[in-house]
Image (cartoon, helix red, strand yellow):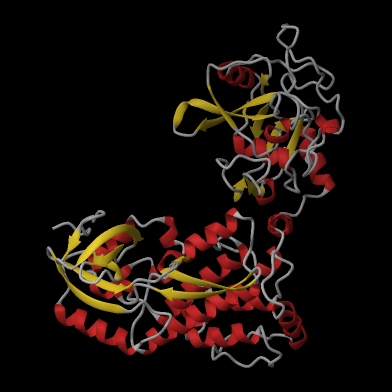
Amino acid sequence: MSSQAPILRQGDVVAKKYEIEAALGGGPSGEAYSGRAINGGRRVALRLIHGPAADPALVADLIGRLKQAESEGLSKVIETGDYRGWLYIVEDFVEGDSLRRLMDAYAAQKRTFSMQEAGQIIVRLLDAVAKAHDAGVLHRHIKPSAVLVKTRQVGPGRAVHTPVLCGSGYSELVHVGVLQENLAVATKDHTRYLAPEMSSPTAGGSRQGDVYSVGVVLYELLVGQTPLGTYISPSQVRDDLPRHIDDVIDLALARNPEDRYPSARDMINDIQRCFTDEAPVQSGIGRRTLGMIVGGVALLFAMVVGGFMFFDPDKVAANADKALRARLIEQNPLPSESEVQAKLAAHPEMVWVPKGTFAMGRMNAEKDVGSTGEAIAVVTEVGAFYIDRFEWPNQKAGYPIVRATYADADAQCAAAGKRLCTAVEWERACKGPEMLHYAYGNEFAIEKCGADAVADLDGDGRGDLASGKLEGCVSGFGVFDMSGGTREWTSTEGPSDARKRFVKGGKRGNATVASRCAYSDAQRVDYTDATVSFRCCIDDP
């Protein structure tokens, strides 16, 4: 028997009692559907559990504990049964939408959740988690799509969101091997909410694991994305948030379970203190305390009692970029002038770029000038290298060679004892130590590098604008013409096609978008154009 439950479709009837209306989604435990009771028309949610049907005694024990945990914030089980050898669980249907869809709707409307809204949702969610834990039920797979939200308007621009957590304890009914199989192919939407120790289903789960998942949801409500690696604190992204919420996040997301809140109620207490002038107390963690400042908490209280608030998403994006840049600049101090000069002496016609990390890809604040298909910036490490100061043949006041194919570019660099630059090296050199959108700054400036890529308008095989003529068209590392000179070949293969290479730099008629350092255009290796040239790199030995 397959480990995956059969797919139900609209009109299918389960156990001669429930007619399926639509699929609601699923996860490692099973697939969920909306439906109606054939007798009486009651709307229900029905879940088919993955894997062979569980021992009836296990099912009865779990349902008994769920009834003991009775809470407005937990989905209510109506009955369980067998459907062609598969366990099904029928729940009350919740009139509302998933928290995932609510988050997506806010993002589409360029709205952010206020501290009051996020706190309201998370405190109620944690209360449901706490009641389930008291009854001995762990969820293990908390994520926005597992939370349904009933929204009630209470005034102009103001709403009350009531979350209902679905699927608590259902993973107990799935064989560990099936869970392992499902986790191996789980979507990013599921795995990014799992605590680090929950990567294997044999871990068994814990209260602290559920707390971690709720912490990820809280972070996403406030910041607009889930925390990755060394995440940026919420107050660094949004200046309307107090730094005290950073402490809540840090405790909830501690990598070591012992360093997290020991219970959902401990997390509730610390979130509620954000809305009162109560002095902080020990959360029972032992190793850490929140250390909140009463004055700051009072300020937050004054901010949120006025009700629902809107925030400028552009400012949120800019703050996120600012925080990321500040962190990377701090982690990558510039070498001394003497070290730079010593490096340049070896290759005076080139620019030396030190090793380090930088933000590779489209920054948050570039959303209005960047394509949605572009990769969002990620911290990328690159070794030290040299790059030509100008386009080929790398001569100030000379004219760049254009109409070059990839093979032409590759051969010319090799003949000079160099190589084509990678797309990562090219972008690093363009963005400079401050990681700017364009080589010269974060706003498009036509006077800096011109409006178009340098073209061969007279057909003589060279661009019609001399290299370095526009003195403002230079990156922070001292490389010229990267945001308005020619378009330039790199050695990096295009996506899923070894016959293509990335071309970076200016683009005729679309300079605001395509002269950004992050922009890439994949072209076939035999492609040529009146605007296409190249420059070379070498490794720093």
Q: Which of 173 and 106 is in front in this view?
A: 106
Q: In which quarter of the image is the C terminus?
A: top right
Q: Which residue is drawn at 67% across and 25% down?
A: 487
Q: Measured along the vertical axis of the image, is residue 112 above or below residue 278? A: above
Q: Which residue lies furthest to the front in this view?
A: 40
Horizontal side of 204 relative to 401 (left or right) equals: left
Horizontal side of 178 relative to 135 (left or right) equals: left
Looking at the picture, how far across and down is residue 519, in whole percent?
64, 36
Quarter assignment of residue 15:
bottom left
Is residue 277 among the parts visible in the rendering? yes
Quarter assignment of residue 130:
bottom left
Q: Nearer the viewer, residue 27 or 398?
A: 27
Looking at the picture, how far across and down is residue 313, in whole percent?
68, 57
Q: Quadrant of the N terminus?
A: bottom left
Count of marks placed on residues: 0
Q: Which of 56 and 395 is in front in this view?
A: 56
Quarter assignment of residue 449:
top right
Looking at the picture, how far across and down is residue 7, in whole percent?
23, 55
Looking at the picture, how far across and down is residue 320, in whole percent?
68, 58
